[in-house]
Image (cartoon, rainbow, N blue to C red):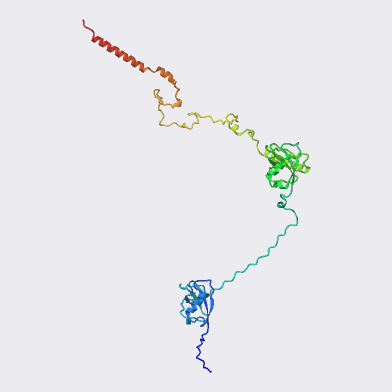
């Protein structure tokens, strides 16, 4: 039998459990690591193992104690159940790593069950369902013509979407001046769309002219209920007008246009002239400018009369008007300077001739 060689020594060092935090992260909960000589025989092997498990920028290069930040340099310095901080090349950042507690997950709110709305038991078709699906039966009067009975018109459902087509359909049986351009109620309310049309109602077709307020509801073709309703509305409106007319004072110039009132040819009421108080003559009794007692300094003084030769300057508007001669008269009276000059030249020539005749006269 062969002999066995010497067996390798077995490492009986117990494994250590440590908790590692991330440097500077207050929300990172520490991870537990089991250190065994088989997996991490050296300190560099431990750092590589921590780099795989702890996400640190540029890998784990240093280990520090969590309280004071002392650096761990070897495996022997690690204690079982100890807590350490893994860091890269940066310095240790002081935080309360030991008391970092994992955050509790937020409570999921239970959604309440939404109960369906309890609707009314009355079965009434809504307007959006019946609109454009039912034809309209209306009665139309001609504007201003009470003796013409209203025309019964059926407007098809396919033409209700276009108001111009509705007016054209009415114009086939009603002939106002210029064709059917507008549609009014018997009260004079203008309809702008087919949504306002109601079955078995009465309307007035208007062309180019304006709507004429006539009692269309008094026609024998109108039902008595409709006649009574419109008659009550008319009575109420008349009562309101009477009350308003009593409360307001009648204006005298309502029928007169404002331009004629402002015209200079329009006769206006004269305003009563307030009589001014009679003026008190200066020096009379009660005059404020008259001293009640004469002054001692002016007693015995003589009144100085005004000099007649004194020239007074009178304003232009107070001077007497002077007669101004016209330009023609002035031109006639002006001397003829050219004629006088010719006469003087002729006289000078005569004098010169006389002198020369005297000088050249022969001596006897």
Residue at (49% x, 79% y) in the render: 45
Residue at (27% x, 11% y) in the render: 353
Left or right? Give the position of 277 relative to 124: left
Left or right? Give the position of 247 relative to 275: right
Q: Does residue 236 appear anywhere in the picture?
A: no
Residue 309's x, y, as percent?
39, 23
Foreground pick, 251 / 273: 251
Foreground pick, 305 / 63: 63
Q: Residue furthest front?
A: 1
**Compared with residue 123, is residue 143 higher up or lower down, i.e. above or below?**
above
Q: Residue furthest left?
A: 364
Corner quadrant of residue 146: top right
Residue 37's x, y, as percent?
51, 83
Residue 221's x, y, as percent?
78, 40
**Compared with residue 294, is residue 240 higher up or lower down, i.e. above or below?**
below
Q: Does residue 356 appear anywhere in the picture?
A: yes
Foreground pick, 289 / 149: 149
Residue at (59% x, 33% y) in the render: 259
- For the C terminus, the quadrant is top left
Residue 305's x, y, as percent?
41, 24
């Amino acid at each position: 039998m062969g002999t066995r060689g010497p067996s390798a020594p077995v490492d009986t060092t117990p494994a250590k459990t440590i908790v590692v935090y991330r440097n500077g992260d207050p929300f990172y909960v520490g991870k537990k690591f089991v250190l065994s000589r088989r997996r991490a025989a050296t300190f560099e092997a431990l750092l590589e193992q921590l780099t795989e498990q702890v996400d640190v920028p540029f890998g784990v290069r240093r280990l520090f104690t969590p309280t004071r930040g002392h650096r761990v340099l070897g495996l022997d310095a690690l204690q079982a159940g100890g807590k350490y901080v893994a860091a890269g090349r940066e310095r240790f950042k002081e935080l309360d790593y030991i008391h970092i507690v994992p955050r509790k997950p937020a409570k999921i709110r239970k959604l309440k069950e939404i109960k369906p709305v309890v609707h009314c038991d009355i079965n009434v078709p809504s307007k959006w369902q019946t609109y454009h699906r039912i034809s309209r039966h209306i009665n139309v009067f001609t504007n201003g013509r009470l003796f013409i009975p209203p025309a019964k018109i059926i407007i098809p459902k396919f033409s209700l979407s276009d108001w111009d087509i509705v007016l054209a359909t009415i114009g086939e049986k009603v002939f106002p001046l210029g064709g059917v351009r507008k549609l009014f109620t018997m009260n004079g309310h203008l309809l702008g769309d087919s949504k306002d049309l109601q079955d078995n109602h009465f309307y007035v077709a208007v062309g180019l002219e304006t709507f004429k307020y006539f009692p269309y509801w008094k026609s024998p073709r109108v039902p008595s209920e409709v006649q009574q309703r419109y008659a009550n509305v008319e009575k109420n409106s008349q009562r309101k007008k009477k009350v308003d007319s009593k409360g307001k004072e009648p204006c005298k110039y309502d029928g007169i246009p404002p331009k004629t009132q402002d015209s200079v040819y329009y006769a206006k009421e004269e305003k009563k002239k307030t009589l001014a108080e009679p003026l008190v003559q200066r020096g009379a009794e009660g005059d404020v400018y008259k001293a009640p007692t004469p002054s001692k300094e002016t007693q015995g003084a003589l009144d100085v009369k005004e000099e007649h030769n004194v020239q007074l300057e009178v304003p232009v508007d107070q001077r007497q008007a002077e007669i101004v001669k016209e330009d023609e008269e002035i031109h006639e009276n002006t001397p003829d300077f050219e004629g006088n000059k010719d006469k003087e030249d002729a006289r000078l020539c005569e004098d010169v001739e006389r002198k020369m005749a005297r000088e050249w006269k022969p001596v006897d």
